[in-house]
Structure formats: structure tokens, C-alpha cells
């Protein structure tokens, strides 16, 4: 009888391990490779089947972003706003979505604000803002929760060029650029604030990488969440970290952006503008 119980216990342990490993494999499955997107596919949804993965136990959800200090409002619904470059519109061509997702474009936010008209939220400066990933309405940021577009930026400092896996959750239309190239477009909401449909393999360069995350919302839930694979989070630095405003963001990200801290930037930014 004792041997029977030992055998039964061994079977139970093996089953538990198999279930655990199976769950781990599913959570790490990459279902989009081969990016960045070609221009003809910039507004095309992924052809791959959605994974519908629950990532609510993931500890790496990003909680801080740098971006305009308010949303683009009255967007006419995400289907109408998604094809428009709202950064280009708000800066009169000084920045675009693609250029904002580069180091040089990010630097220009120190001197170039966003000038949306009053009907779309009005002029915007730049700030660090914090979200609660579990809150399915965190995109409103104290303003309207419907018919809005939100932009958020993070900087990733990598010690070497590497592959990473990016996992977004969003409601509704998400678009993501990295280092001037578009890597993700999906107009379909993911079903829950911490649910992921696509794990996307992306390229990170050695040094600073600028990630621009845009989400357009029509009505109902309004969230934009993002995390990377565990190995990436273990080996890179992501900013904003402790920063609370524009100055402290550029101060802590200075090494990744190859610039001096903001207090020493007068000559640097003058040189950049002349270029």
C-alpha cells in the first residue's frame, strides 16, 4: 500500500509539473515575428490568431510613461483617428510619430510642445504620467474617457543588441513604434486590461531604444498596457523609473540617450536645433 501511495504521489507531482510547464510555454509563445511592419501594413491587423492569454500575474507591466500632458480629445472614434498622425498635426510637422520614436525626436520634446486646437484638448506640454495597469479606465488621465487618443513613451537601455518579446494589452486601437519603425498595429481590443493577444518579437539596439505607444479609444474601457519578456526586464533599464517630470526623466535617461543631464543641456540642444 505504501508503494501505491508513493507511485500515486509521483504521478501527481509529474502532472503538476507538466501543467506548470505547459502554462509557461503558452505564456512565452511568440506569435508575431519578422517585423518591423512594411509601410503597406501599417494599418493592417495581425493575420495571426489571437492568443487570449491572461497575464494578470505578470510582475513586469510598465506603470510610467513620458508623453503629452493630456490626451487628444474628440477623436471622432478610433477608426477615424487611427490613420491620422496626431503628433505631426500638433507640432506642424516638427515631429511625427515615427520621428518621436527616435532619440533625436525625443530630444526635441524639450523645445517642441504639442499644439492641438481647443476642440481636441488644446496645447500640451510633456510630462511623466503613471498608470495602474489593472485599472481598465486609466487612459482618461483626469479628462474624458471616451473618444481619446493617448501617447506614451518609454526608453529602454540595452547593454547589447538583442531580441525581445513585447506583450501589449489595449482598448481599443494600439500602434507601437520602436526606433523610428512601426512594429505593431491592432484595432481590436484585447478583452481585458491584463489580457494579451500577441507576443511580438522585436529588435533592440545597443544603447537607447525609444518606444512610442499610441492607443485610440471610442467608448467603454480605456487602457493601454505593455510588458516585455522576463529576460528583457532582467537585463535592461527602462525609463521613466523614478522620474516624476520632464527634467528628471531626461536626467535619469541621459546615459541611454547619450546626452548630458538637463541642467547642462543649453549648448547641446542649441546644437541639435541648428542641425
Image: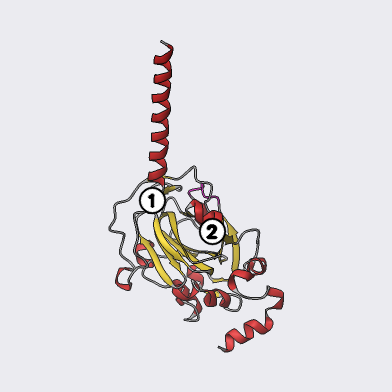
Instruction: Say whether residue 178 is left or right of residue 154.
Output: left
Q: Which residue is outermost to the right?
A: 263
The one of 38 and 191 positioned closer to us in this rendering: 38
Badge 2 element = loop
Locate residue 40: give its quadrant: bottom left
View extreme (top): residue: 1
> Which secondary structure type mostly characterizes the magenta part of the structure?
loop
Count of marks placed on residues: 2
**Quadrant holding the N terminus:** top left
Question: Crowding at label 1, few (<14), some or many (≥20) Cα neighbours within 10 Å?
Answer: many
Relative horizontal placement of residue 92, taking residue 263 as reference (left or right): left
In this rendered view, identify the residue nearer to me: 102 or 245: 102
Quadrant assignment, res 65: bottom right
In the image, residue 14 above or below residue 54: above
| Residue for point 36% across, 46% down | 52
| Residue 222 lies within the magenta run | no
Q: Secondary structure at mark 1?
A: loop
The residue at the far bottom in this view is 274
Residue 155 point in image, percent of width and height? 55, 65
Question: Start and end of the magenta stretch?
Answer: 132-136
Question: Which label belongs to residue 143?
Answer: 2
Mark 2 or 1, closer to the camera: 1
The image position of residue 28, as x and y in percent, is 41, 49
Label 1, on which residue?
A: 190
Q: Is residue 142 at least partly visible in the picture?
A: no
Position of residue 19 in the picture relative to residue 230 (left or right): left
Q: Quadrant of the C terminus?
A: bottom right
- Determine if residue 25 is in view: yes
Q: Nearer the viewer, residue 232 or 3?
A: 3
Q: Is tag 2's residue or tag 1's residue first in the polypeptide sequence?
A: 2
Residue 88: image location, x then y, percent: 45, 77
Amino acid at each position: 500500500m505504501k508503494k501505491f501511495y508513493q507511485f500515486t504521489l509521483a504521478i501527481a507531482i509529474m502532472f503538476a509539473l507538466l501543467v506548470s510547464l505547459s502554462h509557461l510555454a503558452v505564456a512565452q509563445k511568440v506569435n508575431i515575428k519578422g517585423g518591423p511592419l512594411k509601410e503597406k501594413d501599417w494599418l493592417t491587423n495581425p493575420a495571426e490568431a489571437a492568443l487570449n492569454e491572461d497575464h494578470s500575474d505578470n510582475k513586469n507591466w510598465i506603470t510610467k510613461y513620458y508623453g503629452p500632458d493630456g490626451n487628444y480629445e474628440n477623436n471622432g472614434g478610433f477608426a477615424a483617428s487611427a490613420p491620422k498622425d496626431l503628433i505631426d498635426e500638433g507640432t506642424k510637422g516638427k515631429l511625427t510619430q515615427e520621428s518621436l520614436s527616435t532619440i533625436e525626436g525625443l530630444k526635441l520634446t524639450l523645445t517642441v510642445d504639442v499644439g492641438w486646437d481647443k476642440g481636441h484638448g488644446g496645447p500640451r506640454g510633456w510630462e511623466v504620467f503613471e498608470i495602474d495597469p489593472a485599472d481598465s479606465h486609466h487612459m482618461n488621465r483626469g479628462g474624458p474617457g471616451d473618444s481619446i487618443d493617448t501617447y506614451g513613451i518609454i526608453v529602454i537601455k540595452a547593454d547589447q543588441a538583442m531580441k525581445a518579446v513585447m506583450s501589449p494589452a489595449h482598448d481599443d486601437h494600439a500602434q507601437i513604434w520602436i526606433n523610428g519603425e512601426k512594429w505593431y498595429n491592432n484595432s481590436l481590443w484585447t478583452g481585458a486590461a491584463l489580457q494579451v493577444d500577441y507576443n511580438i518579437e522585436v529588435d533592440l539596439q545597443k544603447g537607447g531604444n525609444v518606444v512610442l505607444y499610441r492607443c485610440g479609444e471610442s467608448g467603454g474601457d480605456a487602457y493601454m498596457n505593455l510588458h516585455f519578456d522576463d529576460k528583457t526586464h532582467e537585463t535592461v533599464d527602462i525609463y521613466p523609473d523614478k522620474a516624476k517630470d520632464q527634467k528628471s526623466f531626461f536626467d535619469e535617461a541621459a546615459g541611454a540617450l547619450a546626452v548630458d543631464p538637463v541642467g547642462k543641456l543649453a549648448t547641446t540642444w542649441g546644437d541639435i536645433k541648428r542641425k
